């Protein structure tokens, strides 16, 4: 029997390895084939099962927040402002120069509260006398300084302001943001 050279053994091993790899690759590729027409078709939902909603753009939210800071600056007040969407998600937050550290979170919570009830937070604070457990709802803050933003009589955003010496001033500045949007 003739002895096989080392070079031949290496070459044979390489060919066997390549054949095994090709077979494995082919099997994997075959299982990853394109979906059938039934699989590729997206699920259709009846239009009667959907709703359309109006949202405030980031640009508009930013304009409103900047109007708030400008109104506060004219009265030498240092505030933070937050604008949230209809679902309470934060769109924009701005901390004015010199605003206190607590004002940032308070502004977000006031904005959330205003859009949640579609009412200024100063009015909601008065309602606490009849329903004190409202304050237990997470993420809310029933102090003056939050104003809802509406379109077609439905809330689409909330503007919250915090940091002025009173909730009345905070709410006055929040209304400046609403006025900017009404333009």
Image: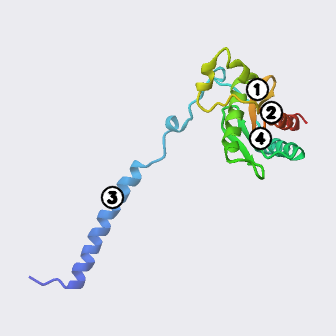
The residue that mark 2 highlights is 171
Circles 3 and 1, Cβ within 8 Å, touching? The answer is: no
Q: Measure the alpha-carbon separation of dots 2 and 3.
A: 68 Å
The residue that mark 3 highlights is 24
Question: Secondary structure under badge 1?
Answer: helix
Q: Nearer the viewer, residue 52 or 67?
A: 67
Q: Is residue 78 left or right of residue 44?
A: right
Q: State which mark lies toward you, 1 or 4.
A: 1
Asked if residue 4 is positioned above or below residue 131 in the image, the reply reads: below
User: Earlier along the polypeptide chain: callout 2 or callout 1?
Assistant: 1
- Residue at 68% across / 32% down in the picture? 112
- Residue at 37% across / 53% down in the picture? 28
- Residue at 80% across / 22% down in the picture? 153
User: Earlier along the polypeptide chain: callout 1 or callout 4?
Assistant: 4
Question: Secondary structure under badge 2?
Answer: helix
Q: Nearer the viewer, residue 135 or 59?
A: 135
User: Earlier along the polypeptide chain: callout 2 or callout 3?
Assistant: 3
Q: Measure the alpha-carbon separation of dots 4 and 3.
A: 51 Å
Q: Measure the alpha-carbon separation of dots 3 and 1.
A: 70 Å
* Quarter placement of the C terminus: top right
Residue 68, percent from left and from top: 83, 42
Circles 2 and 1, Cβ within 8 Å, touching? The answer is: yes
Q: Is residue 44 left or right of residue 122?
A: left
Q: Measure the alpha-carbon separation of dots 1 and 4.
A: 26 Å
The residue that mark 1 highlights is 122
User: Earlier along the polypeptide chain: callout 4 or callout 2?
Assistant: 4
Q: Measure the alpha-carbon separation of dots 2 and 1.
A: 8 Å
Residue lying furthest left: 1
Mark carried by residue 57:
4
Q: State which mark lies toward you, 2 or 3.
A: 2
Q: State which mark lies toward you, 3 or 1.
A: 1
Circles 4 and 3, Cβ within 8 Å, touching? The answer is: no
């Amino acid at each position: 029997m003739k002895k096989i050279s080392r070079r031949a053994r290496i070459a044979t091993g390489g060919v066997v390895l390549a054949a095994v790899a090709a077979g494995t690759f082919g099997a994997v590729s075959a299982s990853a084939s394109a979906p059938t027409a039934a699989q590729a078709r997206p699920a259709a939902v009846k239009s009667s099962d959907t709703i359309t909603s109006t949202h405030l753009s980031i640009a508009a939210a930013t304009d409103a927040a900047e109007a708030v800071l400008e109104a506060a600056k004219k009265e030498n007040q240092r505030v933070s402002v937050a604008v949230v969407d209809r679902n309470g998600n934060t769109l924009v937050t701005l901390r004015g120069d010199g605003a206190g550290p607590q004002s940032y979170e308070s502004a977000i919570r006031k904005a959330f509260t205003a859009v949640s009830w579609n009412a200024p937070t100063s009015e909601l604070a008065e309602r606490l006398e009849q329903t004190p457990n409202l304050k237990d709802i997470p993420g809310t803050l029933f102090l003056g300084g939050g104003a809802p933003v509406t379109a077609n009589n439905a809330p689409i955003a909330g503007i919250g302001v915090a940091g002025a010496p009173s909730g009345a001033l905070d709410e006055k500045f929040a209304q400046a943001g609403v006025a900017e949007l009404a333009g």
